[in-house]
Image (cartoon, rainbow, N blue to C red):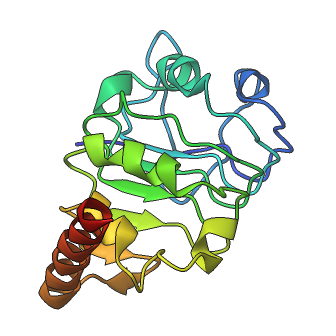
């Protein structure tokens, strides 16, 4: 059995290296570190901080988690993140990125490598206001295993529309 999330939210963390000196918040189910000070958790909360760059995320995961490559749930919401670079997290199933500053849909394309990712939040980012965000199904097409997006279900019909749109866009590009 795994422990509750390692909660580093609301810690005024501006860079991920700052997180290394923080002590996780206490929740209802207490976290108990092992002899090396690491936790048997598959979840990490870094929400509501001022993090802009996630390139050192692997270092933070290795610092706090017994099995850093087995992380399944990551909350990076309400930070200042502008770019997503977390493709080495192959076991990741849930990713909260809402309330950040992500403005490039190509960053979402990178997440397509995360084959276990089934839940994502991106609302409250500049990309959420782009024409081909959800309603044109760019994110849903890019993440074919998606079941929930922005706290709403992704239906089989959403996947059909995403595939249809992708085919139409490819035909349009090759005909011009």
Of residue 138 and residue 150, the one placed in the foreground of this image is: 138
Q: How many numbered discs, if any?
A: 0
Residue at the spot 63% in from the left edge and 33% down from the top edge: 54
Give residue 139's position: percent from left, percent from top.
38, 66
Of residue 164 and residue 109, the one placed in the foreground of this image is: 164
Confirm whether residue 114 shows in the render.
yes
Q: Is residue 140 above or below residue 59?
A: below
Confirm whether residue 4 shows in the render.
no
Most extreme residue toward the front is: 176
Residue at the spot 46% in from the left edge and 11% down from the top edge: 35
As drawn, is 104 to the left or to the right of 92?
Answer: right
Give residue 20's position: percent from left, percent from top.
70, 21
Most extreme residue toward the top is: 36
Residue at the spot 44% in from the left edge and 55% down from the top edge: 95
Q: Is residue 30 above or below residue 147?
A: above
- The quarter of the rendered structure image containing the C terminus is bottom left
Give residue 122's position: percent from left, percent from top.
54, 67
As drawn, is 80 to the left or to the right of 113?
Answer: right
Of residue 106 and residue 12, the one placed in the foreground of this image is: 106
Residue at the spot 28% in from the left edge and 71% down from the top edge: 172
Quarter of the image where one finds residue 124:
bottom right
As drawn, is 151 to the left or to the right of 173?
Answer: right
- The quarter of the rendered structure image containing the N terminus is top left
Give residue 120's position: percent from left, percent from top.
41, 64
Q: Is residue 90 above or below residue 159?
A: above
């Amino acid at each position: 059995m795994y422990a509750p999330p390692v909660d580093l939210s609301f810690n005024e963390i501006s860079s991920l290296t700052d997180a290394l000196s923080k002590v996780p918040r206490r929740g209802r189910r207490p976290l108990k570190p092992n002899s090396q000070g690491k936790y048997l958790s598959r979840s990490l909360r870094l929400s509501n901080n001022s993090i802009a760059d996630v390139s050192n995320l692997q270092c933070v995961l290795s610092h706090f988690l017994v099995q850093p490559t087995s992380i399944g749930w990551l909350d990076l919401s309400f930070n200042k993140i502008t770019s997503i670079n977390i493709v080495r997290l192959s076991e990741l199933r849930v990713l909260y990125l809402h309330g950040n500053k992500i403005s490039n849909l190509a960053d979402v394309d990178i997440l397509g490598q995360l084959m276990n990712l089934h839940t994502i939040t991106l609302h409250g980012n500049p990309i959420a206001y782009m024409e081909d965000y959800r309603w044109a199904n760019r994110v849903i097409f890019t993440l074919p295993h998606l079941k929930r997006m922005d706290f709403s279900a992704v239906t089989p019909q959403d996947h059909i529309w995403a595939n249809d749109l992708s085919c139409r866009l490819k035909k349009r590009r090759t005909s011009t």
